[in-house]
Amino acid sequence: MGTRQTILSGMRPTGKLHLGHLVGALENWVKLQGEYDNYHLIADYHALTTDPDSSRIWSNSIDMLLDWLAAGVDPARSPVFRQSQIKEHTELHLILSMLITAARLERNPAVKEQVRDLNIENVSYGHLGYPVLQAADILLYKGDLVPVGEDQVPHVEIAREIARRFNNQYGAVFPEPEPKLTHFPRLPGLDGLEKKMSKSAGNTILLSDSPEEILKKMKTAVTDPLKVRRNDPGRPEVCLVYRYHQKFNPSGSAEIEAGCRSGALGCVECKATIAGVIASHLSPFRERRAHFESRPGEVTEILADGEARARARARTTMAEVRRAMNMG
Ligand code: ATP
Ligand code: MG
């Protein structure tokens, strides 16, 4: 297993990825894949927690994988795999589910938020257990570091608690995983600073959007309500477009800020500038996506290879788990 630490991080296959996924997590995956042993999971079982319809999971998984590859995930270094194809996830999930109380899971703020946002009336047993399955995902690879967005931090905390419980009960098998945030752990969506960019909120820019689509969407972005006309002074601190400048246009953001405050810079121009910057940032992504899109056989091979490597690692851990529990 070597001396390098392990990264485990995944995403639910809900289709094409948006800037929030990139800025909150994916960027760190790519950045850290030289330093750590990375494993990246397509959380297809997790997709069922909020919607049992499985008919689009395969196409959504491929769409997401294309975005991962487009963003620079290198499958030779970082195995990519579907959770559902490694049986050990369900096995470990069952064992870990005995090590946490239902009350603890009911207090989980992330599930509470999801229930509110998606108007779910009654939470299923499986949905409540979302973080337990996620703990199994992480611990199966003995993940040390979990690069995620801010909304996922409570889940990683639950994985830490479960790892401690297991180690106390049966012997030291698991590291206590730590979350790893980026400088922008919560990117707001186009509809204002309050909501994070999220597919379900319909406030996204996709990594695969064309420059024209990016500009069109950016024009709808909510800006400072007190800056009505071009020459009105604006308040960058309440403007999400300025937030995007800080992230994607760091060298130009001081000038944007000054122009906005003085009123010299209008919102239309400010939005066109950032749309252009984002489009060129994503231009190599679009090229790589097109490359893989035209080679579906290569993509399924990448997945098969990742699944074989992940399975080997998962089997090794499960053997250790069984030995520790005297259930060999
Ligand atoms: P969506 O909210 O768009 O439906 P999702 O909830 O299905 O997406 P997840 O699998 O929960 O997607 O998220 C994948 C990763 O991306 C997580 O680490 C999450 O924290 C991160 N992430 C998602 N949206 C944002 C955002 N707006 N800002 C920062 N990180 C984000
Ligand atoms: Mg989410």
Image (cartoon, helix red, strand yellow):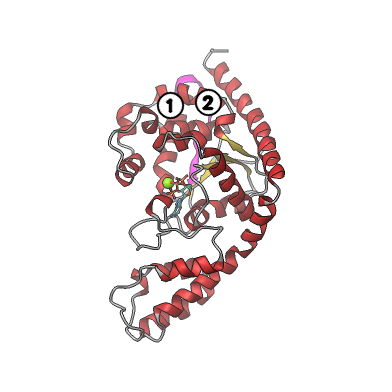
Q: Is residue 69 above or below residue 260?
A: above
Disc 2 CB within 8 Å of nearest ligand 1 atom: no
- Kindly identify the amino acid type of the residue bearing the numbered disc 1: Arg
Secondary structure beneath label 2: loop
Relative image position of residue 235 (x, y in whole percent): 33, 75
Front-most of 142 and 129? Answer: 129
Tell me the residue at 69%/51% (across/down): 294
Is residue 153 in view from this perspective? yes
Residue 175 in magenta stretch:
yes
- Kindly identify the amino acid type of the residue bearing the numbered disc 2: Ala
Q: Which residue is mark 1?
A: 165
Give the quarter of the image for residue 157. Answer: top left
Tell me the residue at 54%/61% (across/down): 209
Disc sitting over residue 172 in the figure: 2
Secondary structure beneath label 1: helix
Disc sitting over residue 41 in the figure: none
